[in-house]
Image (cartoon, rainbow, N blue to C red):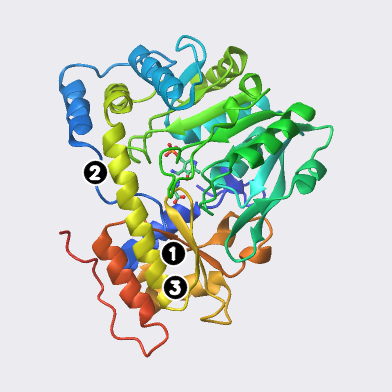
Amino acid sequence: MDRDPGRPLGAGRFSTTVFTELTALAERTGAINLGQGFPDEDGPEAVLRTACDALVSGENQYPPLGGLPGLRAAVARQRQRRYGLGYDPEDEILVTTGATEAITAAVLALCGPGDEVIVVDPAYDAYVAAVTLAGGRCRRVPLLRDGGTGFVLDPDELQRAVTPRSRLLILNTPHNPTGKVFDRTELSGIARFCVRNDLIAVVDEVYEYLVYDGAGHLPPAALPGMRERTLSVSSAGKTFNVTGWKVGWCCGPSDLVAAVRSVKQYLTFASAAPLQRAVAEALDTQEDWVTRWREDLRGRRDLLAAGLTGAGLPVITPEGGYFLQADVSDLTRRDAVEFCRDLPAAAGIVALPTTAFCEKPGAYRSLVRFAFCKRRDLLAEAVTRVGHLRRPSPPVPSQHLEKT
Ligand code: PMP
Ligand code: GLN
């Protein structure tokens, strides 16, 4: 069928996501995929077994729209146990198809055409897409580079982004792609900002367990004046190494959760029943497993950071999440986009220019995001290959290393 190029298909405003492109590139070239953030090992065995049991024991029909009562109760226990935040599983918790659906449904529910959403730049790609789908407009506030060591949000810039059309703030802590974990002082300032400007906060906490070196994750909902205006979003993917399950949730006051639910019913209606049962069990029983995984990840972060630094790519050490930032400006005159374009051929590695998440490249122009949630042998091999970039390159093997 011939299509009229003057009338693009509805989704024509979106190009393929950078993650799909990166993984396709890694598969095509046989490069090590440090681009898309997913681990290459499974989560806790007992949790996988529970999912299998649920599948074969007949839990395969639509679960309730809001999620299995058992999962909502487990989320309520988890928020209470870890953060002292009480939510009623009946009407203050909603199970969603990953954190992505919670965020998208929240934006569609709470932001109308012409409304504005304040987003920290760099931003995870789904936020901007959700605002576009809602017919709203993003006001991006830059997360500034703080010397060579970290990132900081300027409260004055935040305030300058507010207009009479501002409705929401989307915040992500621990932050993808920088690995920044907002501390209590910063979050208190952001909380006062939300209260002062009567904004609803949608807070993406998918890396809530993956915080290193004693930095703690503090949910903004725990700060004064915030519980009644915050939707806290999280999911099982990063915590239990099940990114493909897409089981997420949001917690908040009943009126906000009801608004998200009203949109969710027409996006997916419900989310995979057997996996919900397994995630409920994981939340109740797998904190020790997650503690070990976090320690392991910290070691992988340090392995990759030391290797990249040694190879001439100084690293900004992340306090949380799956990713680190490496600066290519000592190694090359090219920017990170060009560096990453050449990296599969030059070193057999796929990585992501951080500017893929930015409205304005600014100080991010020379930063590359590397995922360190991958197997240690792959990280070690990646380090060796990056080390060759300064010297004439040896031939690059076309396949991943064999699984050990
Ligand atoms: N938010 C952030 C910051 C992410 O990095 C990701 C990627 N996993 C998501 C949301 C998506 O989470 P989910 O897979 O649960 O939809
Ligand atoms: N969150 C992952 C990342 O930042 C990817 C998620 C996705 O593939 N959409 O790499």
Position of residue 11 in the picture relative to residue 96 (left or right): right
Quick one: which residue is furthest to the bottom in this view? 392
Q: Name the residue under label 2.
A: 42
Location of residue 103 (image quadrant): top right
Q: What kind of element bears circle 3? A: helix
Q: What kind of element bears circle 2? A: loop
What residue type is disc 1 on? Ala
Does the CB distance between marks 2 and 3 fall below 8 Å?
no
Residue 294's disc is none
| Of pointers 2 and 3, the one earlier in the residue sequence | 2
Does the CB distance between marks 3 and 1 fall below 8 Å?
no
Residue 351's disc is 1
Q: Mark 3 points at which residue?
A: 309
Q: Nearer the viewer, residue 97 or 249?
A: 249
Q: Where does residue 159 sit, x and y in percent of width and height?
A: 80, 41
Q: Is residue 133 above or below residue 328?
A: above
Quadrant assignment for the C terminus:
bottom left
Q: Where does residue 399 sit, x and y in percent of width and height?
A: 23, 69
Q: Residues within 10 Å of mark 2 (few under 14, many from 20)?
A: few
What residue type is disc 3 on? Thr
Q: Is residue 342 above or below residue 355?
A: below
Asked whether residue 135 is in view, the answer is no
